[in-house]
Image: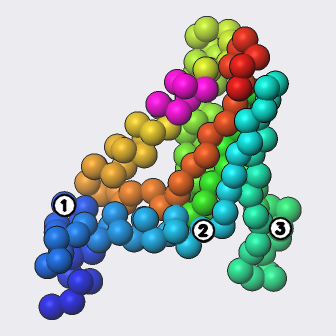
Amino acid sequence: MGDSAYSFSLTTFSRTGKLLQIEYALNAVANGRTSLGICAKDGVVIATDKKLSSTLVDTDQVCKVEKITSGSGFVYSGVGPDYRVLVRKARKSSQAYYRQYAEDKPVSQLVKTTAGVMQEYTQSGGVRPFGVSLLVAGVEGDGTP
């Protein structure tokens, strides 16, 4: 029996003692493009390489750097559709925070919320782990990066 018999469940270990769904997610991140962030005294810069595997893809429709709040953003390496799910969830939670407190969600809370979503998908049945690594950057309300 090959390893494919163990790859359908998050909680089934293969003969080698690995959780294959986790291995697949880590491989997707390792095969992703390089992303980087630079922290300066008065701000943050995030960047990535945007090479597409096919000439049929419209480059204007692929966004690897996304603004979440007015002072924070994400860049990723890995699987694009997984990234879009995390961006949508982060924007939704940031908007709920803004409606309640009338200020942007702090970057530290944004990171904790997004990491919680990613961990939930890693441990829950019926879903697979996200094959994406996020670089979160932002400026807090007092202007510190």
- Which numbered tag is attached to residue 11? 1
User: Residue 14's x, y, as percent?
Assistant: 18, 75
The magenta region covers 107-112
Identify the amino acid type marked 1: Thr
Nearer the observer: mark 2 or 3; the answer is: 2
Residue 66 shows in this picture:
no
Work out whether 70 lies above or below 134.
Answer: above
Q: Is residue 110 magenta?
A: yes
As helix, strand or loop, the secondary structure at mark 3 comes to helix
Identify the amino acid type marked 3: Thr
Residue located farthest toward the top when viewing the structure as drawn: 101
Mark 2 in CB contact with mark 1 (< 8 angstroms)? no
- Which numbered tag is attached to residue 139? none
Residue at (16%, 66%) from the top-left corner? Answer: 12
Residue at (68%, 56%) from the top-left corner? Answer: 35
The residues tagged by marks 2 and 1 sit, at their Cα atoms, a distance apart of: 25 Å
Residue located farthest toward the right when viewing the structure as drawn: 60
Q: Main structural element of the magenta stretch: helix, strand or loop? A: helix
As helix, strand or loop, the secondary structure at mark 2 comes to loop
- Left or right: where 54 falls relative to 134: right
The residues tagged by marks 2 and 3 sit, at their Cα atoms, a distance apart of: 17 Å
Tag 2 residue? 32
Residue located farthest toward the bottom when viewing the structure as drawn: 1
Q: Is residue 132 magenta?
A: no
The residues tagged by marks 1 and 3 sit, at their Cα atoms, a distance apart of: 38 Å
Tag 3 residue? 59
Residue at (73%, 36%) from the top-left corner? Answer: 39
Where residue 54 sits, quadrant-wise, is: bottom right
Identify the amino acid type marked 2: Gly
Q: Earlier in the sequence, mark 2 or mark 3?
A: 2
Crowding around mark 3 (Cα neighbors within 10 Å: few <14, some 14 to 19, many 20+) is: few
